[in-house]
Amino acid sequence: WDCAMAERAFIRALDGGCSSPVAAFAQLMDADTMKLTGLYVTEDRTHSHIETIICPRSDGAACAASLALRMKSEGILWER
């Protein structure tokens, strides 16, 4: 449940949907720690960025949303 909520929070923060070029994958590392990998692709689909964070399981959704917004605002992207 916590992993699914984190993935949804990441995608929601980027206004993602079924056809949006964003993705998230969360997995528990242990009972209290979550690992989240997020993918963000610019609207023109010319640049993409993948980043992974490790955070407390209890803060997974908030950390995921924060990661998504940071990735979008920082513009640290690489060419595909």
Image: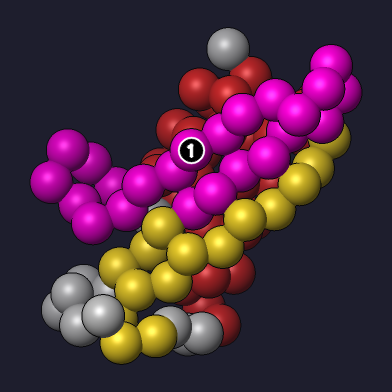
Q: Is residue 75 above or below residue 21?
A: below
Q: Quadrant of residue 6?
A: top right
65 relative position to 47: left or right: right
Query: Magenta stretch: residue 76 in it?
Result: no
Kindly identify which residue carries mark 1.
25
Q: Quadrant of residue 66?
A: bottom right
Q: Is residue 75 above or below residue 13?
A: below
Label 1: which secondary element: strand
64 relative position to 19: left or right: right
Query: Magenta stretch: residue 21 in it?
Result: yes
Look at the image and tell me whether residue 15 can be seen.
no
**Image x and y of residue 64, in percent:** 61, 46
**Image x and y of residue 62, in percent:** 68, 41
Q: Which residues are magenta?
A: 16-38
Nearest the viewer among 19 and 34 is 34
Q: Is residue 11 above or below residue 69?
A: above
Question: Image point 26% across, 80% down: which residue?
Answer: 80
Question: Image point 18% across, 75% down: which residue?
Answer: 45
Q: Amino acid at mark 1?
A: Phe
**Image x and y of residue 25, in percent:** 48, 38
Look at the image and tell me whether residue 76 can be seen.
yes
Question: Image point 47% across, 64% down: which residue?
Answer: 50
In this view, the residue farthest toward the top is 1
Question: Image point 43% across, 71% down: which residue?
Answer: 49
